[in-house]
Image (cartoon, helix red, strand yellow):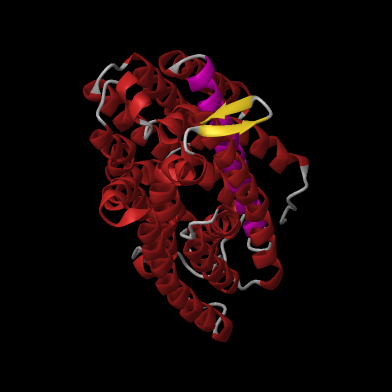
Amino acid sequence: MITTPEQPSQVRILTPLGIGIALSLLGDQTLYVVLADPSIAAQAGISTATVGIILGINRLTRLFSNSPAGMLYDRFNRRTLMILSMALGSLSTLTYALAEGATLLLIGRVLWGIAWSGIWIGANTVALDISAEDNRGVISGRLQMWFFLGAMISSLAAGFFTDFLGYHAGLRLSAGLTFLGMLIWLFFLPETRKTISAAPSYHSTQPVKSVFPWRTTLAAALPLFLLRFVVAGVLNATTILWLSQFLETGFSLKGFFLPLATLTGIFSALRVLLSMISAPFAGSLSDRFQHRWSVMTVAHFASAAGLWVMAYPSLLPAVGGVLLVTISAGGIQALIPAIIGDRIPNAQKSRALSSAFTIGDLGSALGPAMGLALIPLIGIQRCYQICALLYALIFIFAFWQALREKSNPSLVY
């Protein structure tokens, strides 16, 4: 029997799952929001040149931790692995708070990379456990919605904690809140592995193939690579620099002043809010028409246009570009796990997710360092225009996949 997204069993699983994900992001998002500011980097005991490495090393770590995590989730129960991953995430944020130089901070980022492999691959595996082909897009979209909600809250908290509690004290509070997320999973997150048989894959009537479906996985991973390179990498790491073009040290209105770090947190939160809304919408749309790559094509076109407009030196057009990019990003991120869930046998889904996320993590590991390195050489406008051209190339790839999907919906890429 195929369940619907509104049934209590799915809500009972997605709610604690989403709350835990949201709380786990606090430490990581703090570094992304504030660490590019030279004064805050000094408080952390690192140079500005080191920031890109610090921001990217956890993602480089996941290139090696994702595959083992996927194999573990294909073989063992989800719940235990996820609780352990959340505990490691809390430890990593505490390590940031204790660090007064690059060495301990790098160790914390490596720990977070391992922790996030377990958290995110596990969460997406759970979403595929409780979904079927007619609701996989919306279930995936709701999981992404929780992720974006966590990123939004974390962005707000990051700027606020840093400006009003201080860099180290704010991170200590974030570590405690991530530990609370672990307790929520410990007491409220059920095991979902037993429900796999109730959520058949798109090809559930066919025998499971022993050969791993790399072509299908790589087709889904390519858009994820670019999304993580540009949005999670270049844009996230340079938001505070992009805003400083227009608002310098902050925003003042009738005697009320918002410092740049807090303003960056607010802006990042509003941006994530749009992705949070668009993720379940795109997933639902792809469920309705059963053409996920067609929806992906539209999203990439909008992202390319938005990135080009973001490079404008005028604030209002540039903000309009941000809206296009962020709305599209939510849709793309929701569709990729749904495509994998459609095309990959149940026994290989976690491994396929981990492989796609590994390729995505390569993009997000390269993005911050390359963005921060290019901007002093060619300027932030040219940097964003290059990102727009990359999205235009993936638009062509997505359009080709959409044509293949339309001509043969059962095609394994």
| Observer-nearest of 409 and 150 | 150
| Magenta-drawn segment | 136-164
Q: Quadrant of the C terminus?
A: bottom left
Q: Residue 92's x, y, as percent?
A: 37, 24
Quadrant occupied by the N terminus: bottom right
Left or right of 44 in this view: 28: right
From this view, report whether residue 267 is shown above or below residue 204. above
Vertical position of residue 204 compared to residue 195: above or below: below
Overall secondary structure of the magenta stretch? helix
In percent of width and height, residue 14 lies at 65, 39
Residue 333 placement (x, y as % from top left): 53, 55
Q: Residue at x 40, y 73 (%)?
A: 393
Q: Is residue 336 above or below residue 106?
A: below
User: Which residue is at a point 42% across and 26% down the rendered structure image?
Assistant: 89
Q: Specify the quadrant of the image occupied by residue 283.
A: bottom right
Task: Pick whichever, 5 or 319, lies toward us.
Answer: 319
The spot of residue 244 in percent (x, y) is 46, 41
**Residue drawn where x is 38% and y is 41% of the image:** 72
